[in-house]
Amino acid sequence: MKLKQIVQATLAAASLLAIPLSGMAAEVEVLHYWTSGGEAKSAAELKKLMEAKGVSWKDFAVAGGGGENAMTALKARVIAGSAPTAAQIKGPSIQEWGKEGVLANIDVAANEGKWDASLPKVVSNVMKYQGHYVAVPVNVHRVNWLWVNPEVLKKAGATAPSNFEEFFVAADKIKKAGLIAVAHGGQPWQDATVFESVVLGVGGAAFYQKALVQLDPASLNSPTMIKAFDTLAKIKTYIDKDAAGRDWNLATAMVINGKAGMQFMGDWAKGEFSAAGKQPGKDYLCLPAPGTEKAFTFNIDSLAMFNVKGADQQKAQQTLANAVMSPEFQEVFNLNKGSIPARAGVSRAKFDSCALKSMDDMDATSKSGGLVPSFAHGMAIDSAKAGAIQDVVARFMNSTMTSQAAASALVKAAKAK
Ligand code: GAL
């Protein structure tokens, strides 16, 4: 083909394309870190829903539990002036991004969908910046869970623990039976996940609130905190030697396949059990982390919306926000993810016993004062302070640092800016 013909052919193709393109809704690009088996299934549901609404989905998945890598990727994109349509950001970080002036006001969708009426205040407050909706919640995860393989307990002659005393009895028996008592991945965010459940179990919700939310120095460096670190040090002795760097879902897999007995992890772990076809109560147990029956550490995943250019892109963004808040999405996403819907008005019918317990416990603890934000999952304090505290915990997990030294290091970390 001659150049003239090529140009003509290209122009003809472009004009043909222009018709459907202008009539078609634009695309949404969504940054997230839902890459494990259960998580990927959940994210795929959102993609399906958007495509059914005529909006194409550009996946911006960045692997790495807890989202640290994803946040690094997000910063790079925002600095380069090419923010995605939405990103999985939560808690106080939403305020940090709001201050940068890069988040989109989605009040139109929120008013149309009556979000204020269908979200608990504890959720809607987090989604707003200066009184305006800038993010949309997908779920509520409970972090203070212990995942248990009942077959392993049986083999070891152990029983399901409800407090730390019973936990260590069970752990001893599992270890004696030649199995791994505690499945864990040595990554800072996983260390922090165990740590916050231990603080909650040892000190109770009021102590947790004072120490890890209000960052009260006297609570951070207190006999109760030292006891929490002592307990963490003891848990360390039940973790296998290959834990360093292990991803959380591989640790969950060890519980699923009976190599290990127990794992401290939020209920995204349930997504892995479900994806493996396992049934709660039969193949695995979801127990409140030892001593935390009356408390609930919440972790709300949400998609924050970034300023996008052009009417098509903005329309697609509104479609995304509406889709995420729809009861049909909140049901199917959370059935796969292991979490519970963030909004009211979703049928409980298809949810399993762990999810129902989570729903009931969230309700009860919101009245009793036991409902507390997860520090390890970015719900309690700003990212600089959370990062510095996480570093102290990781240092404690990977060295011979004493409990006293760790507790006093927390006071300094809590002042990080
Ligand atoms: C949490 C997040 C969950 C899950 C988990 C593992 O912080 O809220 O949705 O992705 O990390 O990456």
Image (cartoon, rainbow, N blue to C red):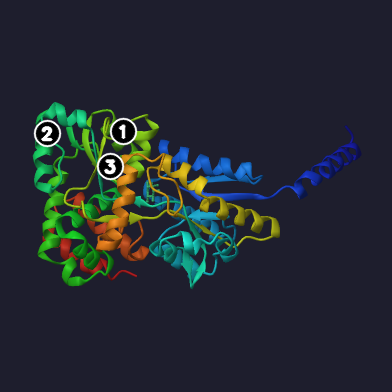
In space, the residues marked 2 and 1 are separated at their CA atoms by 21 Å
Q: Disc 2 designates what residue? A: 158
Instruction: Please provide percent x and percent y for residue 43.
Output: 49, 43
Q: Disc 1 designates what residue? A: 253
Mark 1 is on which residue type? Ala
**Res. 113 image quadrant:** bottom right
Residue behind label 3 places its C-beta within 8 angstroms of ligand 1: no
Q: Could you say which is closer to the camera, residue 244 or residue 110?
A: 110
Q: Could you say which is closer to the camera, residue 154 or residue 36?
A: 154
Instruction: Please provide percent x and percent y for residue 241.
Output: 20, 37
Q: Disc 3 designates what residue? A: 185
Asked if residue 80 can be seen in this view, the reply is: yes
Mark 2 is on which residue type? Ala
Counting the numbered discs, the total is: 3
Q: The residue tagged with tag 2: helix, strand or loop? A: loop
Mark 3 is on which residue type? Gly
Q: Nearer the viewer, mark 3 or mark 1?
A: 1
Tell me which label, 2 or 1, sits earlier in the chain. 2
Q: Residues within 10 Å of mark 2 (few under 14, many from 20)?
A: some
Residue behind label 1 places its C-beta within 8 angstroms of ligand 1: no
Q: Look at 36% across and 58% down and name the residue there.
A: 378
Asked if residue 247 can be seen in this view, the reply is: no
The quadrant the N terminus occupies is top right
In space, the residues marked 3 and 1 are separated at their CA atoms by 11 Å
**Res. 123 image quadrant:** bottom left
Instruction: Please provide percent x and percent y for residue 413.
Output: 26, 66
Tell me which label, 2 or 3, sits earlier in the chain. 2
